[in-house]
Image (cartoon, rainbow, N blue to C red):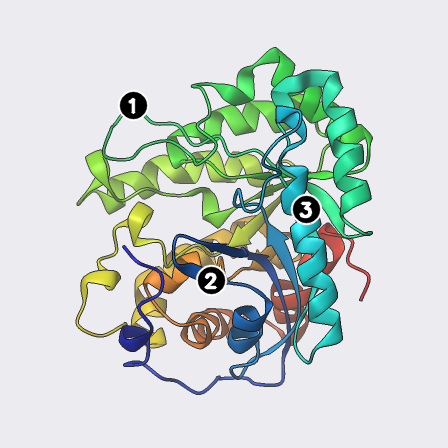
Amino acid sequence: MSLDRFDWLALRVEEPIDADRPIIDPHHHLWDRGGSTYLVDQLHADTGAGHNVVATVFVECMAEYHPDGPEQLRPVGETAFVAEQAARSRDSEGATISGIVSFADLQLGDAVEDVLLAHEEAGAGLFRGIRHASGWHASDAIGNSHTKPPEHLLLDAEFRRGFARLGAMGYSFDAWLYHPNLPELLDLVRAHPEVPVVLDHIGAPMGIGPYVGKRAEVLEEWRPSMRALAACPNVTLKVGGIGMDRYYGGGWAAREAPPTSAELADYWGDVLVWCIDTFGPSRCMFESNFPVDRESCSYTVLWNVYQQVADRYSDDEQHQLFYQTAADVYRLDL
C-alpha cells in the first residue's frame, strides 16, 4: 500500500480541534527512496497544517546508511543524515527535530559501545537512543520486522549485554514488536530495570494473517502483557501507530475516502483510553508514526483523533500526553 496517495488523503480535510495546545511528535521517519520523499519540507507541511507541533523525534527507518565501511557502523549514516535535516528544521519555520533514535545491532554485546559513540558524534547532540526492532512471527502473512530479527531476539545473551551497555551509557531503547512477542520484552525489562524502554505503537495488537476477524481475542491476549509492562516503572508507552492497516487490518486504506477522526476515535478510543489508564498519562505519549500512518489518514485527522480521546483527561494530563512525557523521556532541550 502506497503511503503517498495525496489525492485520496485530500478527500478528508478537517480543521484542528485544538490548534493551540503544544505538541511534541515523538515518532516520525524521514526518507527519500523508492519514489517516496519525506524530508523536512514534507514534515513541516504536516506539522504546520493546523496543530501546534513544536518539536519532533526521529525514529530509525534504515534510511541513508553508509554504503560501505564496517557493517556495524553503516547505520551511523542515518544519524548523520537526520542531524542535517534537524539543522534545516531549525533554520526554517516549523517544528524542530529535537531528538534522534537510531539503530545499532545490540547483538554486538559490549562491542556496541563503539557504535553508540559513533552515533553520538554524528548526532550533533540529538542522539537519544536505539530502536532494535524484534517483531517476529511464524506466519508468512505477517512477516518479521524490517531489521529481520531472529526468533527470540530479546532473550539472546549477547543482545542483553548490548542492551545493558546502552542503558549504562545513558540511552533509551525503543521496542517495536508484535503482541505475541510482549512476554519476551517483559522478561527483558524485568531483568534490566535500569534501562529506560519506550514501547512503540501500543504493543501492536495484530489484525492480519491468523488474527483477521479476531480483534476481541487479540486484545484479550494483549492486555495481560501490557498490564505487566505497565507495572515496570522503566517502561513508557507510545500511544499511536493506529493508521497501520498493514499490521492492524482496520480496512481504512481500502475505503473510497479516508475515515473521519470521529470514526477512528470510535474504533480505537476504548483501546487508547485503556492504555492511558493502565500506564498513566505521565508514562504515555501520543505519536504520529508519519508518514507510515498516512496510509489511513492525514496528519491533522490523526491528531484530532488523539484530541478527542484525550478530552476526558485534565489539562495537566493532556499536557503530559501531548508534550511533557516525550520531553522527559527523550531528554529534549526545548
Q: Amino acid type of disc 2?
A: Thr
Instruction: Give coordinates of residue 25: x percent, y percent.
Output: 60, 64
Element at label 3: helix
Residue linked to disc 2: 37
Element at label 2: strand
Q: Amino acid type of disc 1?
A: Ala
Residue 291 versus residue 129 in the image, above or below: below
Instruction: Give coordinates of residue 266: x percent, y percent.
Output: 32, 68
Residue at 29% from the left image edge and 77% from the top image edge: 7
| Residue 204 figure quarter | top left
Mark pair 1, 2: CA separation: 32 Å
- Viewer-side label of 1, 3: 3
Residue at 20% from the left image edge and 34% from the top image edge: 210
Q: Is residue 235 visible?
A: no
The C terminus, quarter of image:
bottom right
Of residues 273 and 92, the one drawn nearer to the viewer in this rendering: 92
| Residue 107 figure quarter | top right
